[in-house]
Image (tube, rainbow, N blue to C red):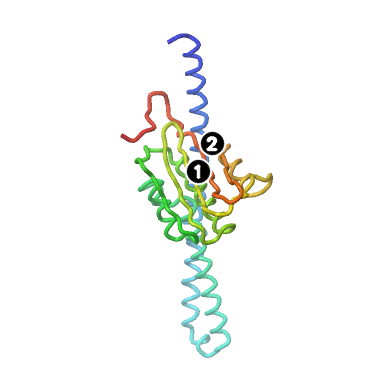
Amino acid sequence: MPAGEEDAARTIERLTNSRRVIVEAYEIERRRIERDLHDGAQQYLVAASMKLGEAQLSPAVRSDPELAVLLTEAGKALSDGLSALRRTVRGIHPQVLGERGLEAALGDVATTAANPVRIVCPNPLPKLPEGVLAVGYFFVCEAITNAAKHVPGIPVTVLLSADQDLRISVLDEGPGGARIIPGHGLAGMVERLATFGGRLSLTSPPGGPTQLIATIPVLLHRGESGVNL
């Protein structure tokens, strides 16, 4: 290999390694937060709920209807808070994402989305770094949420493919006219993708449809394949 090509290859390898470090650091921090919420805050709430249940069985409570009502309301608020926390924990890094991959995880999202959502993955995706999976997953979640907010009830199609990059297209059949405005939702998407070396393109002519395409480097080392054969 000519010297120039060797230098370029080494530079690319260094960039790939540095990007992997960033992605892995984000993923480690995400899992730390998930673990702290699950093992810390959640356990305190469970313990408080059990104590409250014991208090409701007290003879003093049975003889005081107003206190019984207050404890019941407190119990419901605590239960609602625990449910919200559990949803947050699951949302930080959905278990199915690591176990079954991006397509399956997004399939779960589609079943509960406010808009009709179709997930299309013509070819099996290769094994991707967990950080890359997470970036793609949360990009789609945010895009689906935006569609529900701006074009409620409109069908959304998500197309997944990968080679050297993970490419995700989110297309809605709304009236179009979307723009990337500094300080607003789509601009935030651009910034978050750029953190991982990704980029966002938007097509949204008047009359629609609107298509967002995220391109996220798979961060392969030289000789690794981005195609799942």
Look at the numbered discs 2 and 1 and tell me whether their residues touch, using CB distance below 8 Å. Answer: yes
Rendering coords of residue 82 (x, y %): 50, 65
**Which residue is outermost to the top?**
2
Query: Going by the image, does 81 lie left or right of 102?
Result: right
**Residue 127 or residue 182, whichever sits in front:** 182
N-terminal-most mark, 2 or 1 = 1
Rendering coords of residue 136 (x, y %): 48, 44
Task: Determine the residue positioned at 41% across, 33% down.
Answer: 163
Task: Determine the residue positioned at 46% across, 31% down.
Answer: 219
Q: Is residue 143 above or below residue 25?
A: below
Rendering coords of residue 184 (x, y %): 66, 49
Residue 39 appears in the rendering: no
Label for residue 229? Answer: none
Label for residue 135? Answer: 1
**Residue 30 or residue 175, whichever sits in front:** 175
* Amino acid, disc 1: Val
Q: Is residue 153 above or below residue 25?
A: below
Residue 212 appears in the rendering: yes
* Label 1 SS: helix
**Which residue is outermost to the front?**
207
Task: Determine the residue positioned at 41% across, 38% down.
Answer: 128
**Residue 183 or residue 203, whichever sits in front:** 203
Would you call the spot at circle 1 few (<14 residues within 10 Å), some (14-19), or many (20 or more)? many
Task: Determine the residue positioned at 40% across, 53% down.
Answer: 107
**Which residue is outermost to the bottom?**
63
For the N terminus, the quadrant is top left
**Residue 176 or residue 64, whichever sits in front:** 176
Residue at numbered disc 2: 198
